[in-house]
Amino acid sequence: MVKTNLKQKKLKHLFVDGAFTPEEFMAGHKERYVNRPILPPKMTIVDIELAVAKAMDRPMNKPFGLLHQSHPPGHDSIMGLAAWPSAMDIFQKLVGSLRTSGFDGHIILGVHEHLPFEEKKYLIKMDVTFYAVPFVKCNDSIATGGGGSGVRGYCSKSHEDLKLEWGRFEMALEWLHACEQCTGWTLVCDTRDLFFQANPFANLPSPPNTSPYELMFIEEISKHTCPKKNDPKRYYVLGTSFYQGRKGDCYGEYHLDFMDRPVLCSGTIIGNRHGMERFLAVYVDEFHANNRKKKSEMQISPFDRSVDFKCNVLLGQIWRV
């Protein structure tokens, strides 16, 4: 788990010194392990703060398509996109395991616009807030090249300039902003392959604003965490063949400093309210910035999956959240 501290007076020390100590992890000193971003060329701490402020000032729409508003007693929140035509098995694993674990906070989901009655009834019973997410054709300005299906081939109503795989983060930002009671910890997550064995926030500081860390990221498997140390095919680092040849189209040679770093998982992001609002604002701002780039600046389709965390967080902006 990668933690980032957002207190400005500590930004330079904790954020951008580029420290990476896998040898500490491998020696069993996990509490000493760090994986800190590298400050991009010609950037200063002031530049970072100005960029963050600009992202957070970006106009925000009200959430689209509210179908049901829940009122659970807790203040933590878990949110994600689950807009399949039929998803009862996913709801039962995700929502059911959360409620069984004792989680009493907000569960906020984006669902199919024609959600079956039985599934709607189940979500209401489980005290879930859910929004309709109609699939639509993407804006012509981004619908060039690539293609695909599902979250990589369509956009949603009110987010026509971000494919669903990106737009879900703007939805989450809008959902969080609209949830006045969501003042605790927040998890923005994938939904198809996730279930819970305990309250995910049980061991985190309470209240969340007392935590020294406002954001927590989960690393993918890499050499220092892989159960099979000599099986590089299992590593999920920037230098693997899955990523090579693609990152330079987003941020030039800057990515070379990260080649041995584990990728951060976009499907499990934890933060307190301030940290999550800050992160989502920056993340979404970067998506829109990449959409505005000319073809000569980024020879890659906005539909290409490789743009997601490789271009937009690990390389482009982790230093400024």
Image (cartoon, helix red, strand yellow):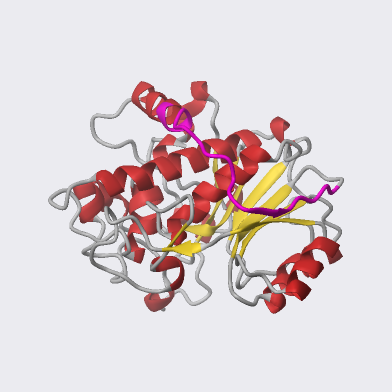
Q: Is residue 149 above or below residue 291?
A: below
Which picture quadrant has residue 68?
A: bottom right
Q: Residue at x 69, y 35 (%)?
A: 211
Q: Is residue 63 magenta?
A: yes
Q: Residue at x 87, y 45 (%)?
A: 73
Q: Using the image as rendered, state which of residue 31 and residue 201 is in the foreground.
A: 201
Q: Viewed as shown, does residue 117 lie left or right of 224?
A: right
Farthest residue to the left: give it: 296
Q: Using the image as rendered, state which of residue 194 and residue 290 is in the foreground.
A: 290
Which picture quadrant has residue 262?
A: bottom left
Q: Is residue 302 magenta?
A: no
* Image label count: 0
Q: Position of residue 69 (x, y in %)?
A: 76, 50
> Which residues are the magenta region?
54-72
Q: Residue at x 40, y 38 (%)?
A: 319
Q: Is residue 92 above or below residue 175?
A: below
Q: Viewed as shown, does residue 191 lie left or right of 256?
A: right
Q: Position of residue 178 (x, y in %)?
A: 66, 39
Q: Position of residue 11 (x, y in %)?
A: 47, 28
Q: Residue at x 50, y 70 (%)?
A: 226
Secondary structure mostly seen in the magenta stretch: loop
Q: Is residue 216 visible?
A: no
